[in-house]
Image (cartoon, coloured by chain):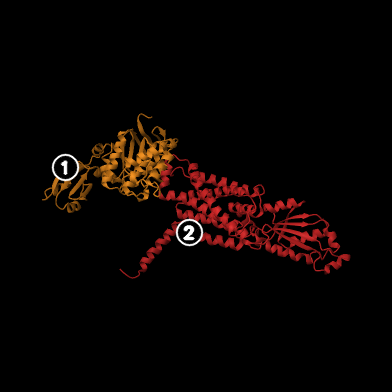
Amino acid sequence: MLGISFGRIAAVFVKELIQMRRDRLTFAMIIGIPIVQLVLFGYAINSDPKHLPTALNVQDNSVFTRSLTAAIQNTGYFRITNIVHSEGEGEKLLASGGVAFLLTVPPQFSRALARGDKPSLLIEADASDPSAAANAMAAISQLPATVFNNDLKGALRPLQATAAPFNVVVHRRYNPEGITSYNVVPGLIGVILTMTMVLITALAVTREVERGTMENLLAMPLQPFEVMIGKIAPYIVMGYIQVTVVIVAALLLFGVPMLGSFFDLSVALAIFIAANLSVGFTISTIAQNQLQAMQMTFFFFLPSILLSGFMFPFRGMPAWAQVIGEVLPNTHFMRIVRGIMLKGSGLADLFGDIWPLLIFMVAVMALALVRYRRTLD
Amino acid sequence: MSGGLAIDVSGLTKKFGSRTVVKDFSIQVPKGQVWGFLGPNGSGKTTTIRMLCGLLVPDSGRGKCLGYDIRTESAAIKRNVGYMTQRFSFYEDLSIRENLDFVARIYEMKDRGEAVDKAIAQLGLTKRQGQLAGQLSGGWKQRLALAACILHRPQLLLLDEPTAGVDPQARREFWEEIHMLAAQGLTVLVSTHYMDEAERCDRIVYLAYGTILARGTVDEVIANSKLYTWIVTGGEVRDLARELHDKPGIEQVSVFGITLHISGTDDAKLEKAIEPYRNRPGFTWTKSHPSLEDVFIHLMGPFREQVTG
């Protein structure tokens, strides 16, 4: 019979509904993805981060300095987290990413101020992510005009009238020109690796299940660990090839600086790649088929790109999102790769981000081995 | 080893959820014999084979395979057993040689290259060894799978419906190879749906809904069935079949082209039931032994209403 039959359309429609209901994972994705995206974009992403950790190096303790510290915190952009006593100590904090700003009040600051010498205040900003630092820099440049109005009394009153009794000298460290690609391109290494490494292992194992070759593997004298290492190792090599491509492009096409050592970077990469591969392996022990493996990979990939500080300043996210972000390997790798390339940090400086990666890797590998089925039960 | 037995298991039971797939399964297979495993789909043949080679852990029961405990020594069993899955489970995107080489590596064979060469030569595939396994026809895939299963020189071969969907010529060659291997001392347990294959086995075990319903040589199984069969030839046996199928005393009527098999367990009742039809012109009636198939259909009878997944 020719022509369109609503009965037949209904038949297909009902069949699809039944299949959709049985495929609970797809269903969860349909409901889950919009909610996850809404929450992430709606709440977690804030391109105007506030309360950024700031280290204070005060070499002149006076009423002015105290007003200054209070005023800086009142801008909402700075949160004094560390008091340092030397320039070197502050530099280290900045390099490891522990603070975003280092504020130095030079000795004799208040005396010079009182004399009307217009002394200078030094703010060093971690500008490797230009957008994270921009608004804070703008806020602080407003300060000199008004901050001391309450303190400039009596004989000092005339200073109130002057445009600004002191200067703020801003040093944008690590990325002085504020070039976004300096920040984005190294970060891309983490994003690309997260996507390909997780997906590729997830599919490689699930494919064995789907094609029925898993039954054969299980029937042969193979230990789960042997399967896992044998499967993961080739992809580590592949990961390094990917990284080489991105780094060559970063250096040649985007002119991104490489201040740190390639050795340090490859050590960090090995841990990061292994961590991602073990996520893929774990997914493959849960997924029933390749489609599910892809869906689960996407679920892992989404927060890895949004909550890791790749797209949006990490410190601009609410606390709960930062907690999730801190668990993800990409977050730590993002800091490591930017630290090595843009700041010239070494592995020792970055240890605070190396150990979470290691713990993540070991924990997920253990999970994968426990979940890996030795039998068909 | 336990008195020259390749397989010695008793009381194996396996449940999936609330469904018992294999119930109190016991067999003792002497070394060097070929045993056939028969039964309808979903009768637990695959599950039993998987328990024997350590792929599934039985819920209860115990036993040994090649002298190794099936519960605790599955690693040793895996090294000495060749298991051929129902579905082709080698890599379609690897060549014939690469597949065999992979298997040889897994079993850590010292003479790997030589063993693979020999296996390929035996298959007669020396010229096509670089061809992808996925491009092979069903019969060749199954021969490749067999070659891969025996590559590590196992002592026991478990074959799960190895000849499903394979043409008669290839099946015959396959069975010739099985018997050659058995002659060399290999024990073979093979599940099948084909009656002619069952007849090639030293012993058969008939499984339905997880329970062994019959076992022994083909002749023993037929004799023990206590089934009486009449064979009718000539004319329109289909019409005759329709008339006979619900008569008391007749339990089975089946048409094989121009012959009709009529069976029942009560000899006298059966003869009484067919009495009115025996004088019809154009038909020849002969009392005969039931075929293996008649016996199996008969064995299935009490279970036929059950539904399994």
For the N terminus of chain A, give its image quadrant: bottom left
Name the residue tied to disc 2: A27
Residue at the extreme bottom of the image, as rendered: A3
Q: CA distance from mark 1 to mark 2?
A: 63 Å
- Residue at position x 63%, y 49% from top? A261
Q: Position of residue B121 (x, y in %)?
A: 33, 41
Please give left or right for residue B30 compared with residue B261 in the image. right
Disc 1: which chain? B
Number of numbered markers: 2
Q: Is A247 above or below relative to B190?
A: below
Q: Residues within 10 Å of mark 1 (few under 14, many from 20)?
A: some
Label 2 CA crowd tier, 10 Å (few <14, some 14–19, many 20+): few
Q: Nearer the viewer, residue A274 or B41?
A: A274
Q: Amino acid at mark 2?
A: Phe
x and y, in percent, of residue A203 in the image? 47, 52
Circle 1: residue type: Lys
- Figure quadrant of the C terminus of chain A: top left
Mark 1 lies on residue: B287
Q: Residue furthest right?
A: A155
**Colour for chain A in the figure:** red
Q: Chain of mark 2?
A: A
Q: In orange, which chain?
A: B
Residue B124 placement (x, y as % from top left) = 31, 43
Residue at image point 20% right, 46% down: B262
